[in-house]
Image: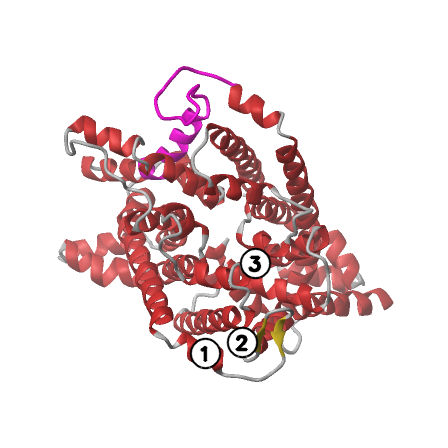
């Protein structure tokens, strides 16, 4: 690699990481608005821990992320099987819907679900948020699992079928154990997406069920504050842990 | 035998019903409401009208649409220009497998990090007493701090910053499939650098370029918090327009009309993309 190329790639990494590093460093800055460096402090973190509103929205976020990731992974894995292995009439159309869904702007899903929940007179809160999160996680789970099924050795299934295994046995005893690492990766991605979502949650939750990204959004709208730096740093830390777990799982597969 | 008969229809029924209830019906609802009349009390009055679309044809709204598309196009181009050489360097000039893996992980981390957090982090860098101003002052480029936040510059920087991984990762997938021997062969046969790029590298990484551009372009169209935070709510894009109809103006029919146009655009782009990409794994880049 020549010098210019090396310099260029370093610059791109600086662009990607500099703001995050600044954020982390300032979260330990004693100055209230983080303008000048006034020494190291953990005050902002202590303040976060004593903020009961923040604690409850963090709990809500983790609850929704765990539930929605688990349900979406369950439904998504079965759906991937339905869409990919059992080729039924119209399967292709549904597969396309899944892909369009994964790519299309979040705001469209946000308002369309808001309209649905209004039509059936559901109060916005825990249940509407959970249903929405399952729905936006679903396409990502399906795509990960389908791409794993594509590289699946069909002879294993044929052998099992020849020996008299039912579809359920084929799935639970052969397919599932072999695609497990993809299923776990899918769960981790779903969990992260759910924990980070601002746009869809913004439309489908009510004042009684606040989640972390929305609390953060309303805080950031009021400007820069050291508590927000600390909160963002903590969320970033959680994301890092999830990525390393996921990377570990991915690697074992190869 | 009974279980076999039940498991198969169960998986099919599950996905069809979920997508029908939570995707198809709500989207039909959006389209349907876009032809109805606004009502102060119940949001919607069931009287058919084309008024919402006629209103969108006015100058104010057309300007927002035009601005959003130019911003999205601009952001997509900047991302592509930054990422393309970068991905080539990472994927084709580094031979060591673990170094390569590490460099890729460094791109995946921001991809997984909340874009709200990254947008906020960008505010820290761009503000008047932020890092960039201090740096420019220190170097002597400027004499007094300049306001870099709350304008189009900040919005575009923020959008590029949050979209960049969505361009880099699909390009990386495409470059990994590109056999370096093709490049060597072309050079051996006397092609100059420009020809190697335009006749070999670009055609063979076309699928990655298309996927990256679609992800960035569509991602930009629906964003509302980046213009709000970095643009200081002064500048609005389609995403803000839709959001305002639902939360401020309470004009659902107008909001759904804008969303309908956006949905049609997404579907058209996807169809064009799918027609032009034969690669069976073309969607894998999404995740």
Distance Cα–Cα, label 3 vs label 2: 31 Å
Segment colored magenta: A13-42
Q: Residue at x 62, y 67 (%)?
A: B23
**Which residue in the rendered view is the most extreme toward the right?**
B2
Q: Is residue B61 left or right of residue A121?
A: left
What residue did someone put label 2 on? B34
Question: Magenta stretch: residue A29 in it?
Answer: yes
N-terminal label among 1 and 2: 2
Q: Is residue A174 left or right of residue A249?
A: right
Circle 2 residues within 10 Å: few <14, some 14–19, many ≥20: many
Position above or below: B181 against A47: below
**Numbered disc 2: secondary structure:** loop
Where's residue B284, x and y in %?
Answer: 49, 57
Q: Nearer the viewer, residue B195 or B247?
A: B247
Dot 1: chain letter: B
What residue did someone put label 1 on? B53
Checking the image for residue A143, the label placed there is 3
Dot 3: chain letter: A
- Looking at the picture, do discs 1 and 2 lie on one chain? yes
**Numbered disc 1: secondary structure:** helix
Q: Nearer the viewer, residue A224 or A200?
A: A224
């Amino acid at each position: 690699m020549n010098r210019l190329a090396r310099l260029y790639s370093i610059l791109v990494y600086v662009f990607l990481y500099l703001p995050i590093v600044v954020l982390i460093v300032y979260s330990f800055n004693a100055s209230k608005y983080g303008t000048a460096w006034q020494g190291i402090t953990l005050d902002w973190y202590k303040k976060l821990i004593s903020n009961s509103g923040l604690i409850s929205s963090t709990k809500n976020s983790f609850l929704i992320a765990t539930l929605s990731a688990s349900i979406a992974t369950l439904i998504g894995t079965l759906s991937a099987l339905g869409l990919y292995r059992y080729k039924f009439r119209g399967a292709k159309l549904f597969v396309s819907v899944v892909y369009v869904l994964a790519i299309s702007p979040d705001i469209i899903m946000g308002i369309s679900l808001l309209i649905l929940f209004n039509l059936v007179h559901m109060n916005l809160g825990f249940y509407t948020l959970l249903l929405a999160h399952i729905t936006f996680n679903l396409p990502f789970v399906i795509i990960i699992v389908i791409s794993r099924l594509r590289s699946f050795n069909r002879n294993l299934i044929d052998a099992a079928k020849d020996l008299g295994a039912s579809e359920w046995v084929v799935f639970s005893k052969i397919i599932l154990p072999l695609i497990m690492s993809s299923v776990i990766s899918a769960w981790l991605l779903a969990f992260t997406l759910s924990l980070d979502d601002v746009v869809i949650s913004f439309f489908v939750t009510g004042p009684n069920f606040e989640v972390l990204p929305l609390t953060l959004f309303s805080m950031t709208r009021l400007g820069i504050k050291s508590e927000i730096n600390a909160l963002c740093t903590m969320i970033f830390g959680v994301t890092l842990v999830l990525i390393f777990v996921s990377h570990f799982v991915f690697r074992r597969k190869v | 035998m009974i279980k076999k008969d039940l498991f198969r229809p169960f998986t099919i029924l599950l996905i069809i019903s979920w997508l029908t209830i939570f995707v198809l019906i709500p989207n039909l609802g959006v389209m349907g409401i876009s032809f109805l009349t606004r009502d102060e009390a119940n949001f919607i009055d069931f009287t058919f009208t084309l008024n919402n679309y006629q209103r969108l044809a006015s100058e104010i709204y057309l300007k927002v649409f035009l601005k959003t598309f130019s911003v999205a196009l601009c952001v997509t181009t900047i991302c592509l220009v930054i990422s393309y050489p970068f991905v080539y360097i990472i994927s084709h000039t580094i031979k060591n497998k673990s170094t390569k893996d590490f460099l890729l992980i460094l791109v995946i981390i921001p991809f997984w990090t909340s874009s709200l957090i990254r947008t906020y982090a960008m505010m820290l860098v761009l503000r008047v007493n932020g890092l960039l101003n201090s740096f420019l002052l220190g170097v002597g480029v400027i004499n007094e701090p300049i306001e870099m936040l709350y304008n189009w510059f900040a919005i575009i920087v923020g959008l590029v910053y949050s979209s960049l991984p969505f361009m880099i990762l699909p390009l990386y997938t495409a470059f990994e499939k590109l056999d370096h021997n093709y490049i060597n062969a072309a050079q051996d046969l006397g092609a100059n650098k420009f020809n190697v790029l335009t006749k070999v590298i670009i055609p063979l990484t076309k699928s990655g370029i298309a996927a990256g551009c679609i992800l960035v372009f569509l991602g930009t169209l629906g964003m509302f918090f980046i213009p709000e935070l970095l643009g200081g709510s002064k500048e609005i894009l389609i995403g803000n327009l839709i959001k305002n109809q639902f939360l401020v103006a309470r004009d659902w029919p107008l909001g759904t009309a804008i969303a309908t146009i956006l949905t049609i655009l997404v579907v058209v782009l996807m169809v064009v993309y799918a027609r032009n990409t034969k690669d069976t794994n073309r969607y894998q880049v999404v995740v």
